[in-house]
Amino acid sequence: MRKFLVVLDESQECLSAMRFAALRAAHTGAGVEVLAIIPPEEFNHWIGVGNVMREEARERIIAHFEVFAKWMRDKQHVDPELVIREGKAVDEIIAQILADPEVGVLVLGAGTSKKGPGPLVTQLSKSAGSLPIPITIVPGDITKEKLEAIT
């Protein structure tokens, strides 16, 4: 089965990307894979603290994922899967794409601030030509109605 890979983070544009991925999956019979990334710790020498911080990050990610997953299951009849990786965001996104041959499209939400579309969109669009799958970039401020109309 083909899957839409979408990145779960704390950004506003994440919501638009999640909605797009779920709607497209529902309309095409595909799946949704939600990727959450725990960034590398700066203080690796504090192993006990690092382990506690990692576990807290995982708990926050699972709670955040469950909100999206409930909506996807209840409203779109799509049962998403969660993948948690640790490392630098772009490296881990590429690694996940390469690790799961069922992933067919990467869905990213673009930020709407004057700073630009966000670091993931900026970095991944530079290497889009060498990725084995297409990237769909969803405007962060797109309305729910517009998303439903285009999916």
Image (tube, grey):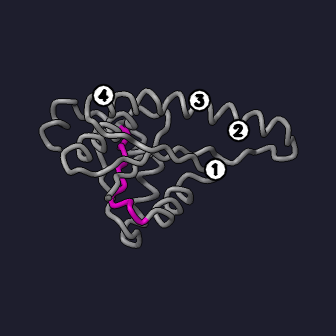
Q: Report the side of 72 relative to 49 (left or right).
A: left
Residue corresponding to mark 3: 60
The three-letter code of the residue at mark 4 reads Asp
Q: Residue at x 20, y 51 (%)?
A: 28
Secondary structure, mark 2, is helix
- Circles 1, 3 touching at the beta carbon (< 8 Å): no
Residue contact at pointers 4 and 3, CB within 8 angstroms: no
Residue at image location 41% in from the left, 64% down from the top: 126
Residue with the mark numbered 4: 74
Q: CA distance from mark 4 to mark 3?
A: 22 Å
Which comes sooner in the sequence, label 1 or label 2?
2
- Could you tell me residue 85's position as x and y percent? 59, 50
Compared to residue 133, the image places residue 17 above or below, namely above
Q: Which mark is residue 86?
A: 1
Up the image or down, 69 lies above or below 110; here it is: above
Going 55% across and 56% down the picture, which residue do you hit?
92
Q: Position of residue 129 (x, y in %)?
A: 36, 71
Q: Which residue is mark 2?
A: 54
Q: Are marks 1 and 2 in contact (CB under 8 Å)?
A: yes
